[in-house]
């Protein structure tokens, strides 16, 4: 009996402190656990992108009544939509817990409070942009390219220098403008448009000779938006290789968690597979010398 009593006492001493109301003995919360993430709204991941949402970055038919035009970001189709949902899943979110909001491209990296947890619409990292917002690690490395109307003189250009005599156009706030001014150095100031749709319309109406855009975007432009156009060529990489990153409110701790998700997607081959599925059709254009 004495042995049994002693064992009972030892058993009582072994009861966890948490049961007896003592100090918390469990592990600290996971900093990247869903409940710990710094979000606009608990339990919901809000993703911003530009509107219209163009292929190949977004795909799927435009939904009736949707605020988004051309494509449907909620479809999970298109490179950026697929990457976004891949990140969301690795952070613990179901598709029903992801919301999309339309934000103009140029406002995504402007100073001020953001109406999104992260934003993706082919935003290139630039040190000057990173003064106002935080960027994730890269989810895609990109080249710029020039699109012109078939049969026009610019389509015969084989070098960057050959572009200098033509009127070039870009969307406002893009790295395409910086590339033109710094490396192409055209004879006339590039035309700047408020949106990609406006820039494409200017090309279609021959208000400009060439449109400079991210190379993967040329496929949709030449096949759908302006079927009379063609890719003049890709522009060579100058300086640091251009990369796309997700955009966040400056200093948001969510960045580290998203970087962890992107690292997993890179190491397990997910990013490469998504590139091959959605962006491979853009290959083949010559690089201008």
Image: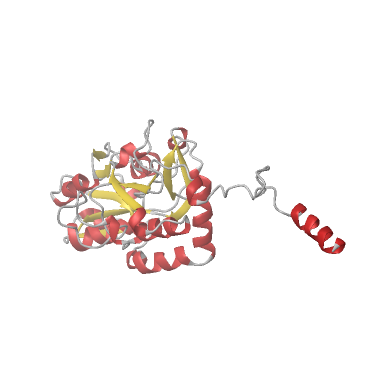
Q: Nearer the viewer, residue 170 or 85?
A: 85
Compared across the picture, whether 52 is left or right of 115 comes to left
Please tell me which residue lies in front, 107 or 128. Answer: 107
Give me the residue at 35% from left, 48% from top.
Answer: 47
**Residue at the (36%, 62%) spot, across then down:** 286
Which residue appears at 31% of the width and 44% of the height?
164
Q: Which quadrant: the C terminus?
A: bottom left
Q: Is residue 27 left or right of residue 43?
A: right
Left/right placement of residue 180 relative to residue 8 reads left
Across and down, in percent, residue 202 comes to 17, 46
The x, y position of residue 42, in whole percent, is 41, 44
Task: Please state, as top left, top right, bottom left or bottom right, where the N terminus lies in the image.
Answer: bottom right
In this rendering, the count of numbered labels is: 0
Please indicate, yes or no, whether residue 158 appears anywhere in the rendered image: no
Closest to the observer, 281 or 84? 84
The quadrant holding residue 54 is bottom left
Q: How is the image coloured?
A: secondary structure
In the rendering, at what x and y percent does residue 16 appear?
70, 52
């Amino acid at each position: 009996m004495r042995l049994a009593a002693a064992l009972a006492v030892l058993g009582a001493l072994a009861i966890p402190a948490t049961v007896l109301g003592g100090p918390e003995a469990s592990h600290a919360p996971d900093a990247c656990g869903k409940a710990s993430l710094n979000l606009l709204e608990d339990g919901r991941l809000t993703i911003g992108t530009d509107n219209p949402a163009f292929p190949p970055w977004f795909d799927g038919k435009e939904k009736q009544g949707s605020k988004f035009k051309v494509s449907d970001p909620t479809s999970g189709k298109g490179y950026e939509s697929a990457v976004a949902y891949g990140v969301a899943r690795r952070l613990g979110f179901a598709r029903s817990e992801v919301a999309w909001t339309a934000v103009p491209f140029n406002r995504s990296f402007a100073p001020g409070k953001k109406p999104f947890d992260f934003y993706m619409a082919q935003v290139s990292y630039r040190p000057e942009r990173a003064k106002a917002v935080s960027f994730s690690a890269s989810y895609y490395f990109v080249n710029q390219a020039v699109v012109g109307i078939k049969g026009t003189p610019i389509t015969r250009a084989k070098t960057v220098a050959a572009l200098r005599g033509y009127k070039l156009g870009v969307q406002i706030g893009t790295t395409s403008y910086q590339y033109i001014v710094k490396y192409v150095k055209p004879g006339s100031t590039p035309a700047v448009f408020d949106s990609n749709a406006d820039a494409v319309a200017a090309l279609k109406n021959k208000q400009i000779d060439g449109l400079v855009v991210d190379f993967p975007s040329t496929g949709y432009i030449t096949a759908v938006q302006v079927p009379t156009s063609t890719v003049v060529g890709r522009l060579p990489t100058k300086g640091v290789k251009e990369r796309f990153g997700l955009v966040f409110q400056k200093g948001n701790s969510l960045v580290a968690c998203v970087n962890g998700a992107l690292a997993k997607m890179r190491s397990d081959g997910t990013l490469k597979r998504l590139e091959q599925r959605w962006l491979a059709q853009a290959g083949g254009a010559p690089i201008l010398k």
